[in-house]
C-alpha cells in the first residue's frame, strides 16, 4: 500500500524524518558516487535524497507513482517531478545512468514489473540503488513512519528479486538502527546506534540499501554432459555345419 505524498512530506519535515534522511542519505550518496554529467532518476519518494545530486548531474528527474501522489520539486525553478505509472514510464530505452528507488518497491503490486521497467530505462551497465524496509527491523513493524507500510523484504528475498529481473547486486548495506521513536534521547543518540549496529552487523536495521548493475544477458547454468556410449548391433559369422555323408 502506497503512503500518501502528504504523509511522506510530513514525515521528512519531522525530527525523526530528518534523522532518517541523514542516515539513509549517507549510504545512498556513497553508493551513487560521482554523478557529474550523468542522468539520474529517483522513483517513489526520493526527493529528500536528490538535493545534492541535482547540482552535479546532467539531468535529475523525480518520478512519483500515481497511487502516492506528486509534489512539485525542486521548490524553485523548473519542476523536475512527474506523476507516472511506475511500470510504464514516459522514457525511451536506455535513457538513464542511475536510478534511486525509495518508498517504491514495497508499495507496488508487482515489484518484478517495476524492476523490469527500471531495467528498460537504464543504460547498459547502468546502476540502481534500492532502499527497502528490512522485514526483521523495527521500522517495518511501526506504521507511524512510511517504512512501516507495504511489503518489507529479507536480504535473500531482495537478492532473488534483483537476479530474476537481470540486476547484479554488488554492494549491500544496512541502515536505520535507531528505534523509530520520537524522543530527544533517541534522536540525540542516533549516530551511536548506527555505529554500533553497523560495527556488529546486527540483524534489526530498518532498511536494506543495495547497489546493483544492469545485466544485458541472463546467466545460464551449463551442465556438463556425460559422454554416452554408442551401442551398435554387430553380426558375428556363424559356421555352417559340414554335410553329413549319405545324407539326403
Image (tube, rainbow, N blue to C red):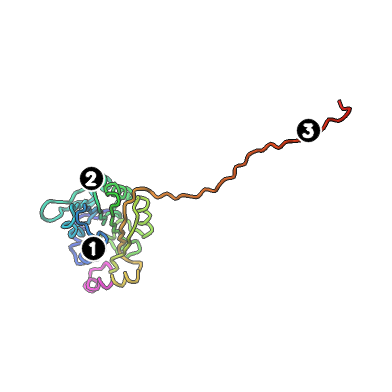
Residue holding disc 1: 25
Whether residue 209 sits left or right of residue 40 in the image: it is right
Chain part drawn in magenta: 179-193
Position above or below: 79 against 202: above
Q: Residue at x 35, y 63 (%)?
A: 136
User: Who comes first in sequence, dot 2 or dot 3?
Assistant: 2
Residue holding disc 3: 240
The answer to whether any part of residue 144 appears in the image is: no
Closer to us: 58 or 241: 241
Taking the magenta stretch, the answer to whether it contains residue 161 is no
Q: Residue at x 20, y 65 (%)?
A: 18
The answer to whether any part of residue 242 appears in the image is: yes
User: Who comes first in sequence, dot 2 or dot 1?
Assistant: 1
Farthest-out residue, top: 248
Q: At numbered mark 3, what does the secondary structure look like: helix, strand or loop?
A: loop
Spatial separation of the CA atoms under disc 3 and disc 1? 94 Å
Q: In the figure, residue 190 lies in which quadrant?
A: bottom left
Other residues around mark 2 within 10 Å, as few (<14) / some (14–19) / many (≥20): few
Spatial separation of the CA atoms under disc 2 and disc 1? 26 Å
Q: Tag on residue 248?
A: none
Residue holding disc 2: 91
Amino acid at each position: 500500500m502506497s503512503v500518501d505524498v502528504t504523509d511522506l512530506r510530513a514525515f521528512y519535515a519531522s525530527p525523526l524524518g530528518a534523522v532518517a534522511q541523514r542516515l539513509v542519505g549517507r549510504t545512498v550518496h556513497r553508493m551513487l558516487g560521482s554523478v557529474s554529467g550523468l542522468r539520474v532518476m529517483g522513483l517513489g519518494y526520493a526527493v529528500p535524497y536528490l538535493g545534492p545530486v541535482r547540482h552535479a548531474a546532467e539531468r535529475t528527474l523525480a518520478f512519483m507513482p500515481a497511487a502516492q501522489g506528486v509534489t512539485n520539486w525542486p521548490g524553485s525553478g523548473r519542476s523536475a517531478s512527474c506523476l507516472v505509472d511506475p511500470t510504464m514510464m514516459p522514457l525511451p530505452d536506455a535513457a538513464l545512468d542511475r536510478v534511486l528507488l525509495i518508498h517504491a518497491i514495497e508499495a507496488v503490486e508487482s515489484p518484478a514489473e517495476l524492476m523490469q521497467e527500471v531495467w528498460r530505462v537504464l543504460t547498459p551497465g547502468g546502476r540502481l540503488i534500492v532502499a527497502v524496509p528490512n522485514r526483521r527491523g523495527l521500522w517495518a513493524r511501526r506504521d507511524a513512519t512510511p517504512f512501516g507500510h507495504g511489503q518489507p523484504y529479507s536480504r535473500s528475498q531482495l537478492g532473488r528479486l534483483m537476479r530474476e529481473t537481470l540486476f547484479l547486486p554488488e554492494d549491500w548495506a544496512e541502515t536505520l538502527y535507531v528505534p523509530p521513536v520520537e524522543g530527544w534521547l533517541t534522536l540525540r543518540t542516533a549516530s551511536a546506534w548506527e555505529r554500533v549496529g553497523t560495527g556488529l552487523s546486527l540483524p534489526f536495521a530498518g532498511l536494506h540499501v543495495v547497489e546493483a548493475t544492469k545485466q544485458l544477458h541472463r546467466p545460464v547454468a551449463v551442465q556438463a554432459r556425460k559422454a554416452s556410449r554408442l551401442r551398435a548391433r554387430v553380426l558375428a559369422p556363424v559356421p555352417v555345419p559340414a554335410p553329413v555323408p549319405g545324407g539326403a
